[in-house]
Amino acid sequence: MAKKMNRRSFLKYSGAVGATTAISGFPAILRSQPKEILVGAVHPVTGPAADIGVSCRRASLLAVEEVNSRGGIKSLGGAKLKLLLGDNAFKEEQGRMEAERVMKEGAVVLTGPFSSGVAMTIATLCEQRQIPFVMDVAAAANITQQGFKYTFRCFPTSSNFAGNEILYLETLMKEKSISKLKAVVSNTGDLFGRDQGATFIKFFKDKKFPVDVLAHIEYPLGIQDLSAEVSKIKALKPEILIPITRPGDAKLMITELYKQRVELMALIGSGPGLYEPEFVRDMKALSEYTMDNVPWYNPQGKMYKEVNDRFSKLYPGKYIDTNSGYSYLAILVIADALERAKSAKPEDIKEAVKKTYFKQDLMVGGAVTFNDKGDNVNADTAMVQVLGGAVKVVMPAKAAEAKYVFPMPKQLWERGM
Amino acid sequence: MKTVYGLLLVGLVALLILPQFLSSYVLGIFILIFFYAYLGQSWNILTGYTGMISLGHSLYVGIGAYVSAYLAMAAGISPWIGMWIGGVCAALVGLAIGYLGFRFGLRGVYFVLLTIAFAEIGRLIFLHLKAFGSFQGFFITPRFAFANLQFKGNLPYYYIGLGYVVFSLIVVRLLERSKIGRYMVALREDEDAAESLGVDVFKYKMIAIFISAFMTSLAGAFYANYLYYLHPGTIMSMAFSIEIVLRPIIGGMGTVLGPVIGSFLITPLSELSRSYFSQAGYEGLHLVIYGFLLVAVVLFFPRGIISYVKKRMMPLIVRSEKSRTE
Amino acid sequence: MNLNLLLQLAVSGFLLGGVYSLIALGLSLIFGVMKVINFAHGEMMVWGMYIAYTLFIWTGIDPFFSFLVSAAILFILGYLLQRTVVNRILDFPEAMQVLPLVGMAMVFENSARIIWGPDYISPQSRFALSSLSLGNVMIDVPRFLAFSLAIVITIVVLFFLKKTDMGKSIRAAADNRIGALLVGKDINKIYAVCFGIGTACVGTAGGLLVPIMPLSPHIGAPFTMISFIIVILGGMGSLAGAMVGGFIIGIAESIGPELITGLFQGVGLDLEFPNTMKQVVSFFILIVILLLRPQGLFGGRRA
């Protein structure tokens, strides 16, 4: 080795060292820009929301890969993002520990956590430690009403959900010249479900909407038998059912509606359960024509097409959806903030996130930008419908990839199953 | 005995100085250790000493947490005061459960099921109470101040947690030496014999459950102001009840130090196994290992770690004391 | 109150009760003979479900037949579990018995998650969507099949216990452990077989439930609880009690909220008993039984 280091290369080498030293000062060699920027991602990969947690984690990892493959954070000398993975198991206690652990390991910004309860705990922690928290998914409005300065939310709030569902229903009724509809609202007895259900009923009443809510049926989360509930729905003879479900009971609901031969014009849900790949795969023809109002990817978006392509290649049978889409987006927002902050210090990152105006066509809605509460004002939901075995956006018109079908041309039991 | 006191003092001093050298994350682990040690001790008062097993203690933590948090949010009452009100509420509920259980002579598995049933009913009721947030959960607005039991750093929580544990140790030790304590142990050993000797068995069981429920619920205020969110599904769940009983059972029921030792062993174990295996990619693996460990520990230390240690250490202590007197 | 609705609810509840009975049956044996709270009961049922599901995916055999395989595998698992873990904790104080089984519950639940993933699965087997109408009332075929099979299996188990040698030994051991030991029976083997049969029952229930409910690793816990309530209601060790208890609980949970709401409104209270609180009905029944008749409906002597 020493032989190779002849006079010429030695001069070149020392010259380079000298030059660097001259430019940034000797200690600067040690103080140079970070090679890696650590981002903490705390998702519920075990526990009752494990399927969603895993999906979010995968999307976050994919996003980090994309950012890095494009050269990392250029304003920081091409520093790469590295994800520190945490598991909140849907429990606040664990969420806090994991958040604290990744902070100890050097995370300068956090993302996650899907559960609103864990979000509250981590948001408080981030406020205490002054580390920015860019939430990908968490729906409860309360989190951003606490006056936190370090917490931001990409996902739409639950009032946004309800407001949009009503808007879409309005559009539908106008276009189909329907003056009144009789509906039953059903929801799972968990935070999101109950919140949504109650918000709908309230909005319907307040805005004197021409939808007659015959009943509001709630059932416990984790229920394994909906025969009683569906019997009640059948007895009420509604025209549409507005189900707010979770993946488990969504399937139960559809099967039970089939078995009890409940006649409906449509199922127009809001929230999870009615769009997951597993739902469509397992319910087959029964899932057809189900409509759901959810924050959704933008099928016309270039960004979406690329990302979904990569995601479904990596994980066959899965695609970017409500939750994973926002997890992906949150990482891009973080990267964008880092780019503008030109620094890896949490305080600078937080300031940069505040000023975010991130144009994107990954998810339905406009550019990501946060108001002073930390909510993404342009976050939106779309109405999707299962058509031909695939989930397609049918409203709003400008993001639509197909025209919605209403009423259902075939009842559940007329589909040859 | 003197050796044990000496060791405890050394331990306490160590715990007082330790935080200077620890990161926020490790402090967080200690906070959980203290929290569960305290809960275990409080539970121990009922079960360890009287032998009436409760698997529904999460109910009391929940009541304490909700009452103190509600009073703080709705009426601005400091949790330092609110926790005692919560304590009274929880104690009353405990008395009601105790009354039903003891008057009707439930023991063993039957009493366990009674406590489970009440805890589950409590959970379901709280899930539907609007004032307490029902399904949404109860969000606690952070306003960092001593009066609110809310702090920016982990250090204050650490010391307060330690305070809770010391408090519980003192209570249990006093109880053990008092007349009440001795009667409680008597009825654990042989309830019928105690009764035939004239001990008012019912009265002492009620005292036990009163104290146990009261003390357990005091920790609720701590929990509420550490995590800033309450939900019946977490704080009043069966899973939480099991976490509470895990540490004293493994450490040694009916002993003063059992729950503390148990917590010092189990809590870091669970934390570390999770952070180690979580990254490995098999989510849930750490829980499989945790489960096996629980089985193994009970099979190898059926009377708890403390009694195992005593058995081993006793000869050493006896020998050293003997050599001193000689 | 809508009587038709009530009738439909009662029928669904009754059929559901049949399924509950089967789950409780296994526990009744374990609890009755060994006095052990099997906290892993629900999670073992979930394993039974996954086994039947896997067979369905690999071979297309309907779970209504492959439950036999679930039963066999769960028997072996139960037997092994008893010999390795449960046997050693039989003489432990109750509190110490709780932990190992809670630990095993965690093991079953999370290993299921690792093997089969966290998603909810709802395989479409042949009978899954069938239903029959009897006038105004709809009868769910999968539930009816599960219900019928549950009765058949109960009869088989009863027969086994009454007529075979092993069965008689199990009953003897339940009544009087010391006596059975004195007579020279291999008590360990008896207990292991008994536990195995108990878990085989629960594995069968799992298999039969695959067409009825979506499957996920974490659905076990509520079933453990329900089976306990049923066993206490029916009486420890009484198989007939488990059957009857299952029906009572099934129906109570279905029509309970409706009836109670009707009661409230009947006395002028504008309150609704929410459906999301339906489990309160079963827990309430449990408390009443514990206080007033702890030996259960069919239990013999006072416990």
Image (spheres, coloured by chain):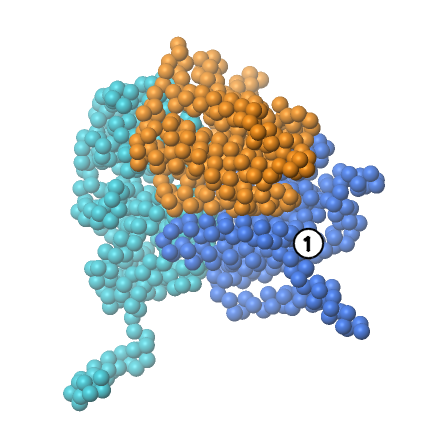
**Residue drawn at (33%, 50%) of the image:** A57
Residue A158 horizontal/vertical position (percent) = 37, 39
Residue B220 at least partly seen: no
In the picture, which quadrant includes the C terminus of chain C? top right
Look at label 1 and name its amino acid: Thr
Instruction: Specify the chain shown as blue.
Output: B
Question: Residue lying furthest bottom in this view?
Answer: A7
What is the quadrant of residue B275 in the picture?
A: bottom left
Identify the hue of chain C.
orange
Left or right relative to C154: residue A188 = left
Question: Residue lying furthest right in this view?
Answer: B197
What is the quadrant of residue B94 in the picture?
A: top right
Residue at image mark 1: B255
Left or right relative to A182: residue C184 = right
Residue C27 horizontal/vertical position (percent) = 54, 33
Residue C30 horizontal/vertical position (percent) = 56, 34
Identify the hue of chain A.
cyan
Count of numbered labels shown in the rendering: 1
Left or right relative to A212: residue B318 = right
Whether C81 is drawn above or below A24: the answer is above
**Residue drawn at (60%, 68%) of the image:** B14
Q: Secondary structure at mark 1?
A: loop
